[in-house]
Amino acid sequence: MAGLTKVAYEMRQRYGAYLIPAPTERLIPGALLEVEWWLSDPRFKHVEGYAWEIADGVTEADCASALGAANALKLNVSDKSKFEITGGLPEYGLSITSALTSEFSFGIEITGITSRCFTKGFIHHEIHQALLNLRETDKNKWRWIDNDLLVLESFYATQFTAHFKHEGNLTARLALQNAGHTMDAGLNYNWLNDNTLSMTGVPKVPFAVRGIRI
């Protein structure tokens, strides 16, 4: 989505993180993400596994992670793009399921971010080295993970506001109500007006990750 450009730029510049077009709950520290590396626009594919499943001497306990304090990071940006309310805004970890197919434009303001990191300090150096050792110890595994991204940190939008607009003056709140919809039960949603939706909480799905290329 073209509207993600500004958020992607801010996350890359401030935190060295990449936005993930189709994020999943599996994107936690220790995950190995298959990537097609282009000069300025890497293309993320899918999680191939976890470091503790692949690297010798690395356990799941070594890769334990935890969320930082809520709103520990701040990102005040606005983006505009098109939104078909069929699967929500997965790029931001927002899940809305609806039968609605009307197209809205929207602007989004992210005002709160938290991140999930390894709980053991400097463990990522040990994990990275254990994965690199596969070049000599297990070439089949190495070919499998070569050029993957080892996820070190996952970012979650804990507070954002979406402003919707429809060319035919259809209101987002009424459209969703008429179509029938469900939202992530773990989050708090509040309609500030008929076209402005506020969300707070920690989504299950991150919208960006930071990592090391293997």
Image (tube, rainbow, N blue to C red):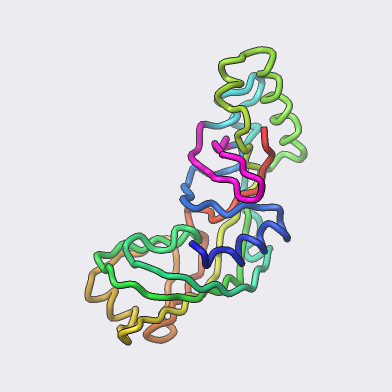
Judge whether 164 appears above or below 45 on screen.
below
Percent from the top left, x then y, of residue 81?
47, 70
Judge whether 159 appears above or below 147 on screen.
below
Q: How many marks?
A: 0
Residue 74 falls within the magenta-colored stretch: no
The residue stretch that appears in magenta = 31-48
Q: Nearer the viewer, residue 70 or 23?
A: 23
Q: From the image, which quarter does the C terminus lie in?
A: top right
Q: Nearer the viewer, residue 205 or 147?
A: 147
Percent from the top left, x then y, of residue 181?
28, 67
In the orientation shown, which residue stands out farthest toward the top? Answer: 137
Percent from the top left, x then y, of residue 39?
66, 46
Q: Is residue 43 left or right of residue 106?
A: right
Residue under the point 42% across and 70% down: 82
Residue under the point 66% across and 18% down: 134
Residue 36 falls within the magenta-colored stretch: yes
Q: Is residue 122 left or right of residue 118?
A: right
The image quarter containing residue 130 is: top right
Q: Is residue 25 left or right of residue 126?
A: left
**Magenta portion: prevailing SS class:** strand
